[in-house]
Image (cartoon, helix red, strand yellow):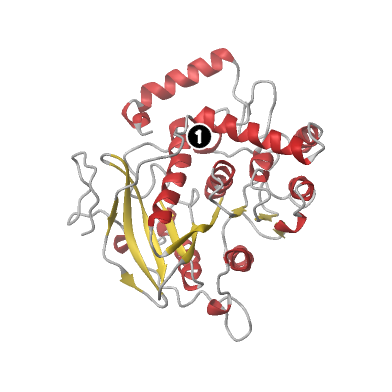
Amino acid sequence: MYRWCVVLALGCMCRLAVAQADRPFWPPQVSIDELEGAQSLKAMGETWSTPQQWRERAAAIRSHIAGTLKLKPEPRPPVPAVRRPAIECDGYSVEAVALETTPGVFITGNLYLPDGEGPWPAVLCPHGHSRARGDDPEGRFRRDHQLRCGTLARMGAAVFAWDMVGWGESTQCDHRTPEALVAQCDNSMRVIDFIQSLEQVDGTRIGMTGSSGGGTQTFLATCLDDRICVSVPVVMVSAHFFGGCPCESSLPIHDGGDWRTNNVEIAACAAPRPMLLISCGGDWTSNTPMVEFPYVKRVYAALGVPESAANVHLASEGHDYGASKRAAMYPFMATHLDLSLDAVCNEEGQVDESPVRILPRADLCVFSDANPRPQQQSTSSTSP
């Protein structure tokens, strides 16, 4: 898959030139008018009326996305892992982990494990496009990201957080290219391969949640990989916005040639698996209760599980994965993954994230001057 990294610049220019000469990408821009988005979603809904017709449409969407991204089908070979010594925290531990997806190419991240013995369910936590601000680092190292991962671990989940392509320690490929969309979808699946390989993990109970660009990763991975059984995409699912980064919308995953789709339908491909949409008033998800969620609810109702789809809308809030959004996610994950919400609640019954230990960026990194990233191709697993 990482052939993209070898010919990145030339490949990007050639692919874009060919695609534009053939026909424009769908969407031709990263967003359309809100009314146009609502109308296009309505038109998509008119293409199906029965459960079987939706299943056929969902299958076509999945097949088209997988074909456009040229994702490798299963079975895939085991993914070798570099695992650094665990850092013990209150009720959980944190390891720096690198997954060698191709000889010499790594997914870099952190594995949060609860105290005690499994088997535990797992929650995948991709990050979005949040850069460092002041003394708060970027991506998976952010304080709010650590709070989310640590709290889920204290609830009894094995949690994996990893770098987007071109972020954090993942510096072997550029981020703002069409190839990043391919790599990030592939990385999500390889992370699942790794998490399922752990003896302490119940691989039949896997959830995924992220916001913004992490929300895009969440609904794309859930659409493509049915091993994800609970999905919580945050402040991202919109009928009129397709993602503002090439890692989300640069390839024609919404263009089936003689048909069109959007991120609402891609997210709805999660059905009948439980899904919570978290939306807000301060971004492109402001219309979710009126436009996007009714469509999703219709899909779930058609499949006989209307109660498995939910929406929490925070009209006065903006584009983030802040405390109130996390507070909405925790009970949903607890319900559908059999996690312990009581383990993280205070006497007033509110989630208390304060026991989570915020670690410095350097402690969360896999590679350092003392433990440099291997320069030679290798296929063996190491566990220093």
Q: Position of residue 43 (x, y in %)?
A: 79, 32
Which residue does the numbered mark 1 point to in the structure image?
246
Characterize the local packing of mark 1: few (<14), some (14-19) or many (20 or more) Cα atoms within 10 angstroms. Answer: some
* Residue 138 in view in this figure: no
**Measured along the vertical axis of the image, is residue 271 above or below residue 151?**
above
* Residue 96 in view in this figure: yes
Which sits in the foreground, 339 or 173?
339
**Measured along the vertical axis of the image, is residue 361 above or below residue 73?**
below
Q: Position of residue 13 (x, y in %)?
A: 43, 21
Which sits in the foreground, 355 or 336?
336
Q: Amino acid at mark 1?
A: Pro
Q: Residue at x 37, y 75 (%)?
A: 89
* Left or right relative to 48: residue 174: left
Q: Position of residue 33 (x, y in %)?
A: 73, 35
Q: Position of residue 301 (x, y in %)?
A: 79, 50
Circle 1 — which element? Answer: helix
**Measured along the vertical axis of the image, is residue 383 above or below residue 74?**
below
